[in-house]
Amino acid sequence: MPDRRENPIAIFLYKTFVFGFGGLCVLYLVAPIFIALTMSFTSGQTLKYPPQGFSFKWYEALLDPVRSATEHIAAWNSLKIAGLAVLGSLIFAVPATIGMSRLKRSTAGTIEPLLLAPLVLPSLVYGLAALIVANFIGFKPSLWLTVTGHVVVFGPLMFRAASVVAQGLNPSLAEASTVMGASWFMTLRRVTLPLLMPGILAGAFLVFIQSLDNVSVSLFLADARTTVLPLRMFALIEESLDVRVAAISGILIAVTMVGLLVARRVLAPPRQA
């Protein structure tokens, strides 16, 4: 069978597809981010590309506690919901990860798809269904109902991230801790959790970002007083194409990039000597 590397036509087609198609995908991902950032520094009065002039006035307007009071409340609600969603995911996903790691492979393979099912179900469908069920049992839309919905929808992200790390752990480490006289709680605190920490932190970051940016679940489960940032951004666009939306996007992009850099630094595997 001829070696593909000796065929210049095959090499050309391969590089054209990989670099050409890959470059288009990267451009499609990066271009909207670049456009959103450049529009946030416009000196114009509406969202428009290319931007008119250069100014920080929309960031100043966004930070103004009087002019952007509603946006500040929405941002605080979103941060609070995202933080509580991370905490709720920790409470359910970490024990599930530890329990699944101790089951037989066949049993774990049967249960795991059920735990990951919320990732497959469209969040819009879940939000509507959760609202119907909540009304049926007497619960009204509220902040806590929204947090519960975010935990159900995004908690599997933490479970998946932690379970990937758990699959690579050596079970003899926990057994050795028990043999040495450590209690199950000490083994959990000093052995199991530290080893799972990279997956837990990665999952916490994913849950936080997804919860902060979610629209569909919050749209159905949040009450009128619980205004969240994504819904407020939609309202600003519908009302007046307010450039503060681009400024909010710029801040969110910066926070996400910083989080990714920190996660890469913290979660990177140690270099071999």
Image (cartoon, rainbow, N blue to C red):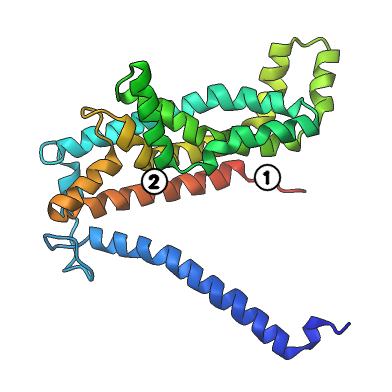
Tally of marks? 2
The residue tagged with tag 2: helix, strand or loop? helix
Quadrant containing the N terminus is: bottom right
Q: Position of residue 249 (x, y in %)?
A: 30, 51
- Name the N-terminal-most of marks 1 and 2: 2
How far is mark 1 from mark 2, CA to CA? 23 Å
Relative depth, front residue between 68 and 56: 68
Relative depth, front residue between 190 and 141: 141
Circle 2 packing at 10 Å, graded few (<14), some (14-19), many (20+), is few
The residue carrying mark 2 is 255
User: Relative to 125, is 98 on the left or the right?
Assistant: right
- The image quadrant of residue 10 is bottom right
Q: Where is residue 30 in the image (x, y as percent from the top left)?
A: 42, 64
Residue 269: mark? 1
User: Relative to 131, is 94 on the left or the right?
Assistant: right
Residue found farthest to the front: 136
Name the amino acid type tagged 1.
Answer: Pro
Residue at left offset 26%, top offset 42%: 231
Q: Can see residue 157?
A: no
